Amino acid sequence: MKQRSDYIGILDGIRAYSILIVAGFHLWQQSWLQNLFPSNLLQFMGVRNFSLNWVPRTGYMFVDVMLLLSGFCLFLPYARQMTDPLAPEPDNLRTFFKKRAARILPSYYLCLLLYLIFWVRPSDYANVKQYLQDIFAHLTFTQTFWPESYIGTKFPTALWTLGVEMQFYLVFPLLARVFRRFPLVCWAVLSVLAQVYIVLFAHLPQGNAESLRINQFP
């Protein structure tokens, strides 16, 4: 079978590696194994164990790697046309959203349906309003907007990543168009907005990151 000219095979390896690291992080969260190995090399300094704890502890960072990879792959057709006007046109708006919906919605909604059938019950919530709000938030990919549907949800909490990704898909065509015309200005504005968000909302006065804010779209 002829391979597409715009296909970058190495990205499949990066994506697979990221998935394994994130899976390892969640397994570590269930076991809390310390990954300590006895070693005599640094015993003269009082160090008796060699630790690989930093590997699973930092695995959550590869969620950001996968989101970054998604944005990179989506913008690649625009970048190619910026350098080569004869390169194929990027997808139009309708095609772009159809591809994103076909890739995510079937398996995502199947997951929600299975949880509604076998796991999530109205009796699990304080009232019917919270039950319906949790369902609505997940159906609309807005679960990160409320603590009840983000941290306190009865659905898999890992679904927040798809909420952020769908929010990104919604504004990506506009961002790509602006970046195509004003790349440095667009990059600078987005970077400043991200930093302002982190300073104003993602950190508590004590300097600790608040989980409800740190994993938001900005």
Image (tube, rainbow, N blue to C red):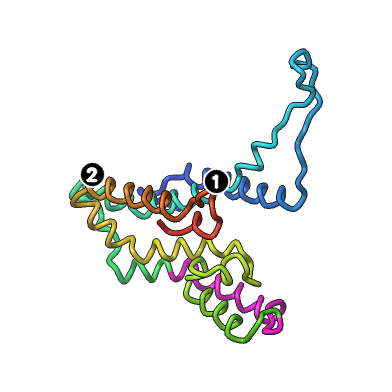
Indicate whether 195 appears above or below 148: above
Q: Residue at x 64, y 85 (%)?
A: 127
The single residue placed furthest to the front in the displayed view is: 205
Find numbered disc 1 in the image and state the secondary structure of the residue it sits on. helix
Tell me the crowding category of disc 2: few under 14, some 14 to 19, or many 20 or more residues within 10 angstroms, Cα based.
few
Query: Is 47 a magenta residue?
Result: no
21 and 125: which is toward the camera: 125
Find numbered disc 2 in the image and state the secondary structure of the residue it sits on. helix
Would residue 69 be found to the left or right of residue 40 on screen? left
What kind of residue is marked 1? Answer: Met
Query: Is 103 a magenta residue?
Result: yes
- Quick check: can you spot residue 62? no
**Residue 217 in picture, x, y percent from top left:** 43, 59
**Residue 60 in picture, x, y percent from top left:** 58, 48
Q: Which mark is residue 184?
A: 2
Indicate whether 99 appears above or below 109: above
Q: State whether the magenta stretch is mostly helix, strand or loop.
A: helix
> What residue is disc 1 on?
61
In which quarter of the view is residue 38 placed? top right
Q: Residue at x 42, y 66 (%)?
A: 100
Work out which quarter of the rendered image holds the C terminus and state it. bottom left
